[in-house]
Amino acid sequence: MRHTPVKYGILCRVKKEDRLKLFLASGFFLGLAPIVPGSFGALTGLAWHLVAVFAGCGDEAVRAWCFFGALLFSAIHYWLTPWAQRRWNNPDPRHFVLDEVVGYLCVPLFWVLPDRPAFPVWQLAIAGFAVFRILDAIKLPIARYIDRNIHTASGVLFDDVVSAAYTAALMTGVAWCC
């Protein structure tokens, strides 16, 4: 008797031609987590940042790496936004997490650290990630306005960039005060 594999999971419900789009749109499938998909998806941005930090790159090289990542993931975001909005029938689908990836990558782009911060940069990155996710979830005033009123690819992306700016300001203050 021949064994027929049982197909479970979301990939079985996605057309073959859409699997790459789903892989990218969900932050390498991390955004498909059943709880807090934005936070799981944003881990892609944190990992991108930490690759350069742990590779021993200098501050400017890390910033350039994050800038390149933000541009790359923004381009993919703009390409996939119409597809994701149709797929999940929502102007800002929760499993479409490229905006969170770009948002996190803007945190190290915007922050201004002292030459010798009191904490290692990788610790600041993890703390910045946590602060970013909290501020992105609560949507401070400008981010809240964008989230509620601008339902284009830019609106979906820019509320996270604004949350990144708030996060970077807070992290800069912590880095300089400690």
Image: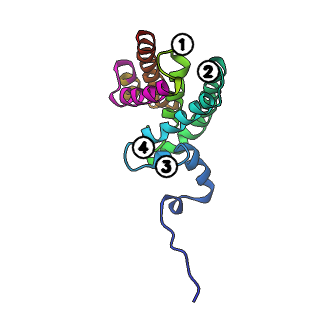
Q: Identify the residue position indicated by label 1 in the image.
A: 116
Could you say where residue 76 lies in the image, as x and y percent from the top left?
61, 37
Q: CA distance from mark 2 to mark 3?
A: 34 Å
Q: Indicate which disc, 1 or 4, sits on the residue closer to the N terminus.
A: 4
Q: Amino acid at mark 3?
A: Arg
Find the magenta span and give its range. 123-143
Earlier in the chain: of badge 2 and badge 3, it is 2
How would you rate the neighbour count of disc 1 (Cα within 10 Å): few for under 14, some for 14-19, many for 20 or more?
few
Mark 3 vs mark 1: which is more N-terminal? 3
Q: CA distance from mark 3 to mark 4?
A: 16 Å
**Residue 94, image x, y percentages:** 42, 42
Which residue is denoted by mark 3 in the rendering?
Answer: 87
Q: Amino acid at mark 1?
A: Arg
Count of marks, rendered view = 4
Image coordinates of residue 169 in percent, x first then y, are 44, 14
> Is label 3 or label 1 in front?
1
Q: Secondary structure at mark 1?
A: loop
Which residue matches tag 4? 37
* Disc number lying in front (3 or 4): 4
Q: Residues within 10 Å of mark 4 (few under 14, many from 20)?
A: many
